[in-house]
Image (tube, rainbow, N blue to C red):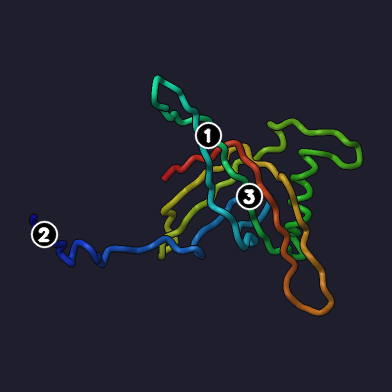
């Protein structure tokens, strides 16, 4: 039996530059990109369908469900991120009147861009028909001077990885 060996130059390369967790921008219409502190990258699950045939089962891919993303933002005095998110939420449901909005009006396309070491865009996701599933406006506390952060759960129909 022949023993296979690997050339060390093929195992360890000097050309490897990982994507970094701190190099990204999330563009949300109505909110400044630098207010976004954390965000999830898109992820999905796919249903499975079984087809029985004699003594075996074949598996087929089914429908895809894109998972909601979590976004955390700083809330400056002006322009207020909380105010921007509440304006977006009112397009979905106007609390004083109880009216629901049209999906074509309340959805936005969010753009998540991964950046390289020199600020170039190396990855781009478009989250189609995004809407606010939940907003948490953050805690307030006399014992600390930390900035207020708000968080939101954003649902979307599907994501496109442009590159």
Per the image, label 2 sits on a secondary structure element best described as: loop
Left or right of 35? Residue 101 is right
Q: Where is residue 84 in the image (x, y as percent from the top left)?
A: 74, 52
Q: Look at the picture and state if 132 lies above or below 149.
A: above
Find disc 2 in the rendering and name its residue.
3
Whole-Å distance between the Cαs marked 3 and 2? 55 Å
Q: Which residue is pictured at 75% across the width and 52% down the height?
A: 135
User: What crowding class fits label 1: few (fewer than 14 Cα within 10 Å), some (14-19), or many (20 or more)?
Assistant: few
Q: Name the residue under label 3.
A: 28
Closer to the eye: label 3 or 2: 2
Q: Dot 3, how many residues are within 10 Å of its Cα: few (below 14), some (14-19), or many (20+)?
A: some
Mark before the other along the chain sequence, 3 or 1: 3
Which of labels 3 and 1 is toward the front? Answer: 1
Q: Position of residue 38 (x, y in %)?
A: 60, 61
Q: Identify the residue under disc 1.
A: 47
Name the residue at 43% across, 30% down: 59
User: Relative to 28, does residue 22 appear above or below in the rendering?
Assistant: below
156 vs 31, nearest the viewer: 156
Q: In this view, does 130 lie above or below 70?
A: above
Q: In which quarter of the image is the C terminus?
A: top left
């Amino acid at each position: 039996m022949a023993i296979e060996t690997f050339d060390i130059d093929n195992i360890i390369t000097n050309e490897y530059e990982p994507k970094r967790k701190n190099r990204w921008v999330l563009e949300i219409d109505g909110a400044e990109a630098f207010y976004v502190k954390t965000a999830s990258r898109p992820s999905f699950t796919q249903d499975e369908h079984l087809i029985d045939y004699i003594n075996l089962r074949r598996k087929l891919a089914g429908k895809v469900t894109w998972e909601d993303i979590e976004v955390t933002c700083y809330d400056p005095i002006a322009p207020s991120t909380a105010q921007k998110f509440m304006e977006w939420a009112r397009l979905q449901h106007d609390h004083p009147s109880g009216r629901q909005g049209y999906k074509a009006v309340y959805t936005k396309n969010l753009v998540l861009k991964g950046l390289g070491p020199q600020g170039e865009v190396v990855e781009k996701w478009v989250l189609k028909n995004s809407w606010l599933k939940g907003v948490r406006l953050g805690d307030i506390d006399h014992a600390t001077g930390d900035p207020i952060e708000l968080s939101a759960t954003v649902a979307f129909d599907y994501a496109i990885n442009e590159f």
